[in-house]
Image (cartoon, rainbow, N blue to C red):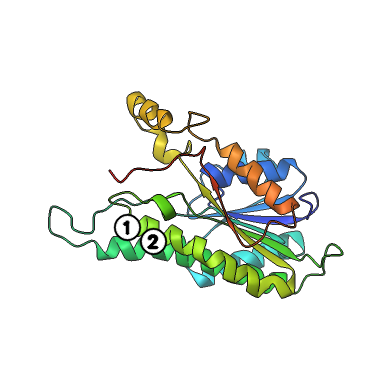
Amino acid sequence: MHLKGNIALVTGGASGLGRATAKHFASQGCKVAVLDRTINNIESLNADGIGLALTADVSDRGAVASAFDQVEETYGSPPRILVNCAGIGTASRILPRDGVLPFEAFEKTLQVNLIGSYITLSIAAQRMTALEPTDEDGSRGVIINTSSLAYQDGQIGQAAYAASKGGIASMTLPAARELARFGIRVMAIAPGLFETAMTAGLPDDARQSISASIPFPSRLGQASEYAELAAQIVRNTMLNGTTIRLDGAVRLQPR
């Protein structure tokens, strides 16, 4: 499937991996809408060719459905491409030292990361089924979810985050199998240690330590590298039903 001329919705698209993806897709001639909980940089988004910025919580089914309605009203068609980058990072032990069990944090992490991805995937797939195929293979759409290397290498304190990202990875194949009859592909990217808002505030020595743990290249990943992989997934029809680790061969230790 081509990026040029098609419509994409990128959740979590106001910053980080989502912002880089939205910008890259727009530069390739894609009509891009971003969805985020808060958007403070609309002028900057517009300057990068992103024509529509929407605010919604991905765990709110009604708000997500309304966002898809707005995309269709603006661009005249539902998106053929969905990239789910919306998510939250949490760190909490199952048995914290203060003795307060973090049930609410666990629920919130799964609600946003896993259930939010499922909601947007479901609504996108429903809208895509009404579209005409774009090629002889019968392609109607592509859905890319964001997992994490934590789904396989979760560290101490990442039970909630790893569970949410593991759920995303686990639903990729059954979703791809179910939606195959409609010509809709489902993929997941599991990024490793990337330059994001979460790593931007780390001290230099901490960043150097993290970089040294990555075999090659020994540096944090760039958001543009995630965006390039997402674009390749859109273009390559044989990429379907799997999770790609994008991590420079790093494997996290328990700590």
Q: How many marks?
A: 2
Q: Secondary structure at mark 1?
A: helix
Estimate the x, y position of residue 236 in percent, counting from the top left.
74, 52
Q: Secondary structure at mark 2?
A: helix
Q: Nearer the viewer, residue 9 or 186?
A: 186
Label 1 Cα neighbours within 10 Å, binned few <14 / some 14-19 / many ≥20? some
Residue located 70% across and 71% down the image: 180
Mark 1 near mark 2, Cβ–Cβ under 8 Å? yes
Name the image quarter holding the C terminus. Answer: top left
The image shows residue 159, relative to residue 49, as above or below, that is below
Q: Nearer the viewer, residue 48 or 43?
A: 48
The image shows residue 165, relative to residue 149, as above or below, that is below
Spatial distance from mark 1 to mark 2, Cα to Cα?
6 Å
Residue located 58% across and 71% down the image: 174
Estimate the x, y position of residue 46 in percent, counting from the top left.
66, 43
Q: Determine which residue is flagged by label 2.
A: 163
Mark yes or no: residue 206 visible. Answer: yes
Residue located 28% across and 50% down the image: 156
Q: In the shown orientation, is residue 156 left or right of residue 192?
A: left
Q: In the shown orientation, is residue 132 left or right of residue 116?
A: right
Q: Determine which residue is flagged by label 1.
A: 159
Report the disc number at residue 149.
Answer: none
Q: Nearer the viewer, residue 175 or 45?
A: 175
Estimate the x, y position of residue 243 in percent, counting from the top left.
56, 56
Residue 23, located in which quarter of the rendered image? top right
